[in-house]
């Protein structure tokens, strides 16, 4: 779920539209207002404490001081609704009133929120419409920009040397985490291979206020680590006010990823 609690897995399919683990697909669920606008941790920071999982054809939601909710994963009779991720149009199938009531209660929202699920035949986002560096045929469900965002543990360690309080990599919500490399070396990995999967770098990930939400408490400060990142990671002239941490990739060759596999930089 977009802005939901991080789900760590040992293996995942790497598909054109992102990672897949069983019935879970990365950022294929989206919380929206009743008029279809996205709701994320930027507006509702406690969303980062909500766990969405799939078991035996059921969608499961868990959150602090909430009862577990289970509903059918597939509800083909529910309406397909138009949504917006930032300014881009996309569609999703409504997950039903029980889910809506659960999320609205959990967020203590004075306005009703709903959950939608992206299905393969629905209208996707086209990242090219946000950034012409993306291929025109690229499609995603509900990510900010790309199917894959990769970053290294060493880049976060470098950041932590500059902070009063350490942050974890979960604060930055990557889909793939790489270890045993130099800080920020991912900035130079234009074409990489992991197992049989091939990824092509498009652009750096410009960071926003969501990085100031603590993934353990759901509290937003709107200051760190973003303020510190701005002092030394304004490295992309195309994103003048957004510091870069991590890189966006498209999937050129699909396959299965396993924790511990070597990342190879492809040179020509």
Image (cartoon, helix red, strand yellow):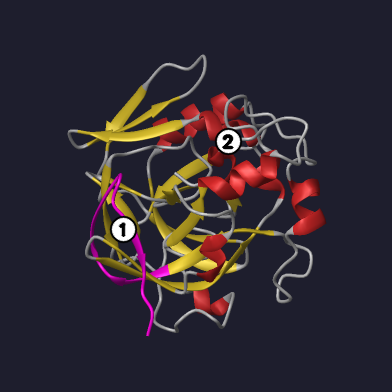
- Residue 215 x %, y %: 58, 32
Direction from residue 92 to residue 209 in the image, left or right: right
The quarter of the displayed image where residue 193 is located: bottom left
Quick check: 237 above or below 50? below
Residue contact at pointers 2 and 1, CB within 8 angstroms: no
* Residue 91 in view in this figure: yes
Of the two numbered discs 2 and 1 in the rendering, the one whose residue sits closer to the viewer? 2
Residue under the point 52% across and 62% down: 186
Task: Assess whether residue 39 is covered by the magenta stretch.
Answer: no
Residue at image location 71% in from the left, 76% down from the top:
238
Mark 2 lies on a secondary structure that is loop
Residue 33 appears in the rendering: no
Q: Residue at position x 25%, y 51% from top?
A: 76
Is 210 in front, or is 31? 210
Q: Where on the picture, by quarter, is residue 162?
A: top right
Q: Quadrant of the C terminus?
A: bottom left
* Residue 41 place in picture, x, y as percent: 62, 41
Q: Which residue is at the front of the view, 259 or 22?
A: 259
* Residue 213 x/y as whole percent: 66, 37
Q: CA distance from mark 2 to mark 1?
A: 32 Å
Using a 10 Å C-alpha cutoff, classify the residue at mark 1 as few (fewer than 14 neighbours), some (14 to 19) or many (20 or more).
some
Q: Which residue is mark 1?
A: 119
Q: Is residue 182 left or right of residue 91?
A: right
- Residue 267 included in the magenta stretch of the image: yes
Residue range corresponding to the magenta coloring: 250-268
Indicate the quadrant where residue 124 lies: bottom left
| Drawn side of residue 206 relative to residue 138, left or right | right
Q: Residue 196's x, y, as percent?
A: 22, 65
Q: Which residue is mark 2?
A: 168
Viewer-nearest residue: 91 or 265 = 265
For label 2, count other residues whose C-alpha is less than 10 Å away and answer few (under 14), some (14-19) or many (20+): some
**Residue 19 to residue 187: above or below:** above
């Amino acid at each position: 779920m977009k802005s939901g609690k991080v789900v760590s897995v040992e293996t995942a399919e790497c598909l054109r539209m992102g990672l897949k683990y069983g019935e879970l697909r990365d950022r294929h669920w989206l919380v929206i207002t009743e008029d279809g606008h996205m709701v994320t941790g930027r507006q509702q920071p406690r969303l980062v404490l909500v766990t969405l999982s799939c078991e035996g054809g059921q969608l499961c939601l868990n959150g602090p001081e909430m009862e577990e909710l289970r509903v059918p994963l597939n509800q083909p009779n529910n309406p397909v609704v138009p949504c917006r991720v930032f300014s881009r149009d996309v569609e999703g199938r409504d997950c039903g009133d029980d889910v809506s009531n659960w999320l609205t209660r959990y967020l203590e929202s004075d306005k009703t929120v709903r959950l939608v699920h992206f299905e393969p035949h629905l209208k996707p986002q086209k990242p090219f419409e946000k950034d012409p560096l993306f291929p025109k045929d690229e499609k995603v469900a509900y990510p900010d920009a790309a199917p894959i965002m990769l970053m290294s543990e060493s880049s976060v360690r470098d950041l932590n040397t500059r902070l009063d309080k350490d942050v974890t990599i979960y604060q930055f919500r990557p889909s793939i985490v790489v270890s045993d490399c130099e800080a920020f070396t991912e900035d130079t990995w234009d074409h990489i291979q992991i197992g049989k999967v091939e990824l092509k770098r498009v652009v750096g990930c410009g960071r926003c206020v969501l990085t100031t939400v603590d993934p353990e408490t759901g509290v937003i400060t709107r200051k760190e680590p973003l303020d510190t990142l701005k002092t030394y990671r304004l490295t992309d002239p195309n994103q003048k006010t957004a510091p870069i941490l991590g890189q966006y990739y498209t999937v050129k060759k699909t396959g299965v990823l396993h924790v511990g596999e070597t990342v190879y930089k492809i040179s020509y």
